[in-house]
Image: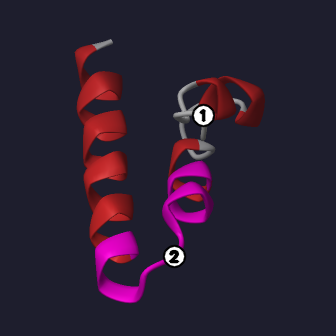
Amino acid sequence: MEGLAVFVGLAFLFAGWVKGAIGVGLPTVVMGLLSIVMPPAQAASLMPSAS
């Protein structure tokens, strides 16, 4: 379980870097990375909502 938490943290960190570099892409990048280790519906539940 700890390895999954580290992967999720690194996925969001990398996706944030991509968003900072090109201005778009956090949801696209993080969904692609997280779907490697978990079902897409579970990965989507980790995404912050835009409110």
Above or below residue 22? Residue 4 is above
Query: How many discs mark residues in the rendered view?
Result: 2
Front in this rendered view, residue 48 or 1: 48
Please give the name of the residue rendered at 51% of the width and 53% of the height, measured from the top-left corner: 30
Q: Residue furthest right?
A: 41
Residue bearing mark 2: 24
Q: Residue furthest bottom?
A: 22
**Magenta segment includes 20:** yes
**Residue interval drawn in magenta:** 19-31
Above or below residue 29? Residue 11 is above
**Magenta segment includes 29:** yes
| Contact check, label 1 and label 2, Cβ < 8 Å | no
Which secondary structure class fits the magenta region best? helix
Please identify the quarter of the rendering in which residue 3 is found: top left
Front in this rendered view, residue 39 or 14: 14
Residue 27 coordinates in the image, percent (x, y): 58, 55
Residue 6: numbered disc = none
Please give the name of the residue rendered at 51% of the width and 76% of the height, measured from the top-left corner: 24
Please give the name of the residue rendered at 60% of the width and 35% of the height, measured from the top-left corner: 51
Q: Is residue 49 left or right of residue 39?
A: left
Q: What residue type is labelled 2?
A: Val
Please identify the quarter of the rendering in which residue 41 is found: top right
Q: Residues within 10 Å of mark 2 (few under 14, many from 20)?
A: few
Instruction: Give the alpha-carbon distance from disc 1 to disc 2, as whole Å.
Output: 16 Å
Q: Residue furthest top?
A: 1
Q: Residues within 10 Å of mark 1 (few under 14, many from 20)?
A: few
Residue bearing mark 1: 49
Q: Which amino acid does label 1 sit on?
A: Ser
